[in-house]
Image (cartoon, rainbow, N blue to C red):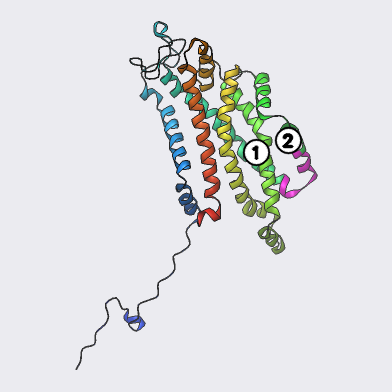
């Protein structure tokens, strides 16, 4: 009798024929977005910069032995590389590195907190006015258009002047300023999405209007508003610093990048540049990082970029 042999890797249940390879299961949308974002080197580098700045601000007491408000008048305006003071001292003898670390807390908070606070309100306003198309929604958008007509910076300055200086008032002024801008983006995105086929199909199927608005429309509107909000954080860094520079922002001697730049301008004519230049460069880098992250998020959420 002859022995029966089987090929290596053959499956006896299929008559000795290896099973066909099954196609890969579709990956979750968030995983595709993360992969697309990771391919953007500038966005990843910008995210790393923001994480480092945020961690440095949080753990400031561990990174410096000095007080952000107490100075050394004897060594005032000492330059970069001074013994014990890596980035030098300002006009009141305060360590610039220390004030940068502690100032990052206020500067990042003023930039991020108002955007996060206004986000859900602007989203609801845009969804309601853009989808319902009722008289109340139109009146609401026209009221916001009145605020939208004012330049963002001028409106922020006016509100800060009325509310008064201080960290809380600055965040409130910036938050009020952002409402018409973010609501307009949410409104436009809602109007655009409402005319697409998947919404028309849901209407034809008899979907509940509120369920359609929150389940079908809102995820797509949130994506567009999220991209805009990320870039707004970069702009708010500049706006908040400008308010402090003009004296209607954070109250001295509280450390803030805008206040540090304002202090440094007083000694520029004396040929002392590091006091204003260092915080100014940091404002530029952080605001640019927010904008690059916003571009990266926009591309990562684009289905065409995810499959390329």
The residue drawn where x is 78% and y is 42% is 138
Q: Residue furthest top?
A: 74
Residue 132 located within the stretch drawn in magenta:
yes
Q: Which is more toward the observer, 128 or 178?
A: 178
Q: Is residue 16 left or right of residue 73?
A: left
Q: Is residue 1 above or below residue 205?
A: below
The residue drawn where x is 48% and y is 51% is 36
Q: Answer with mark 1 or mark 2, whichever residue precedes in sequence.
A: 2
Q: Position of residue 69 (x, y in %)?
A: 45, 14
Give the crowd class for mark 1: few <14, some 14-19, many >=20 residues within 10 Å: many
Q: Which mark is residue 144?
A: 2
Residue 212 located within the stretch drawn in magenta:
no
The residue drawn where x is 26% and y is 77% is 8
SS label for mark 2: helix
Q: Is residue 39 left or right of residue 172?
A: left
Write the start and end of the magenta stretch as one range.
129-141
Q: Position of residue 107 (x, y in %)?
A: 52, 26
Q: Position of residue 258 (x, y in %)?
A: 54, 21
Q: Which residue is under mark 1?
A: 182
Q: Which is more toward the observer, 165 or 265?
A: 265
């Amino acid at each position: 009798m002859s022995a029966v042999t089987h090929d290596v890797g053959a499956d006896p249940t299929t008559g000795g024929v290896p099973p066909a390879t099954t196609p890969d299961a579709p990956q979750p949308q968030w995983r595709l977005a993360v992969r697309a974002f990771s391919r953007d080197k500038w966005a990843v580098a910008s995210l790393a910069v923001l994480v480092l700045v945020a961690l440095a601000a949080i753990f400031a007491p561990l990174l410096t032995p000095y007080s952000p408000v107490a100075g050394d008048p004897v060594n005032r305006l000492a330059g970069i590389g001074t013994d014990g003071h890596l980035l030098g001292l300002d006009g009141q003898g305060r360590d610039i590195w220390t004030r940068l670390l502690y100032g990052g807390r206020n500067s990042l908070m003023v930039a991020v907190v108002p955007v996060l606070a206004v986000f859900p309100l602007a989203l609801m306003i845009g969804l309601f006015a853009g989808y319902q198309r009722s008289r109340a929604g139109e009146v609401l958008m026209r009221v916001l258009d009145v605020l939208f007509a004012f330049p963002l910076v001028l409106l922020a300055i006016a509100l800060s002047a009325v509310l008064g200086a201080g960290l809380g008032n600055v965040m409130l002024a910036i938050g009020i300023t952002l409402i018409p801008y973010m609501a307009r983006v949410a409104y436009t995105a809602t109007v655009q999405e409402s005319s697409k086929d998947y919404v028309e199909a849901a209407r034809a199927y008899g979907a509940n209007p509120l369920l359609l608005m929150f389940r079908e429309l809102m995820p797509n509107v949130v994506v567009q508003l999220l991209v805009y909000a990320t870039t707004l954080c970069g702009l708010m860094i500049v706006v908040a610093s400008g308010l402090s520079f003009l004296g209607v922002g954070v109250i001295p001697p509280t450390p803030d990048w805008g206040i540090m730049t304002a202090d440094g301008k007083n000694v520029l004519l004396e040929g002392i540049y590091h006091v204003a230049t260092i915080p100014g460069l940091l404002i530029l880098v952080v605001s640019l990082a927010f904008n690059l992250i916003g571009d990266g998020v926009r591309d990562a959420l684009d289905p065409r970029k995810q499959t390329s």
